């Protein structure tokens, strides 16, 4: 049994979260029947991730990886095998396309194909201007300014 959530009230009452809400909405619409090729997602550190995908029978020139903004697309295209008559076909030879939504500032840093396992390394690289920074409070300067200007108290009375 599958339940679809209605995110419309959240779109009306939140500002700047439209990309996240759209991702949640599209994730709730994804059909879970197609689970081929199987894959794992591993977090290797605070800002490092790895996707491992079982692509047995595909060569490196039959696979393509494309990163667009916050989307990683992995495609596999195999030519149709026209030779021979199969009595049993258990090894899938179909083409596939797998999409992964990436968070902001996550970049693909490398990909390897070894023994039918495609490994994609990802890293979150936050730009320097977006990283939190500590601002030094200069307390000596504030005290020095106060000491150079003594307070003046006037005791003169003015006649009315």
Image (cartoon, helix red, strand yellow):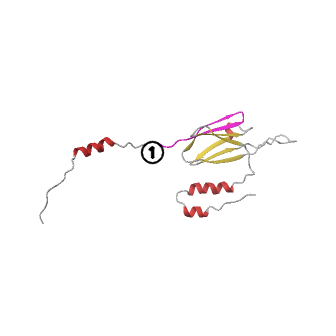
Q: Nearer the viewer, residue 137 or 73?
A: 137
Asked whether, in this view, residue 95 is left or right of residue 104, the answer is right
Q: Secondary structure at mark 1?
A: helix
Residue 31, quarter of the rendered image: bottom right
How far from the left and from the top, in percent, is residue 93? 77, 43
How far from the left and from the top, in percent, is residue 110? 60, 37
> Is 111 within the magenta?
yes
First to last magenta residue range: 108-129
Asked whether, in this view, residue 106 is left or right of residue 127, the answer is right
In the picture as drawn, the residue positioned furthest to the right comes out as 87
In this figure, which residue is indicated by the disc labeled 1?
A: 129
Residue 148, quarter of the rendered image: top left
Q: Is residue 57 above or below residue 104?
A: above
Q: Main secondary structure of the magenta part?
A: strand
In the picture as drawn, the residue positioned furthest to the bottom comes out as 160
Pick the quarter of the image with the C terminus. Answer: bottom left
How far from the left and from the top, in percent, is residue 25? 64, 57
């Amino acid at each position: 049994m599958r339940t679809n959530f209605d995110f419309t009230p959240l779109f009306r009452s939140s500002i700047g979260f439209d990309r996240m809400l759209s991702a949640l909405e599209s994730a709730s619409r994804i059909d879970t029947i197609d689970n081929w090729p199987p894959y794992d997602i591993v977090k290797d550190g605070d800002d490092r991730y790895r996707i491992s995908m079982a692509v047995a029978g595909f060569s490196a020139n039959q696979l393509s990886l494309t990163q667009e903004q916050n989307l990683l697309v992995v495609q596999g295209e195999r030519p149709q095998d026209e030779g021979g008559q199969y009595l049993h076909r258990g090894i899938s030879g179909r083409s596939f396309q797998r999409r992964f939504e990436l968070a902001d500032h996550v970049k693909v840093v490398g990909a390897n194909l070894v023994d039918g396992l495609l490994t994609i390394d990802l890293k979150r690289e936050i730009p320097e201007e977006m990283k939190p920074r500590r601002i030094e409070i200069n307390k000596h300067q504030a005290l020095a300014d106060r000491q150079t200007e003594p307070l003046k108290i006037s005791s003169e009375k003015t006649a009315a």
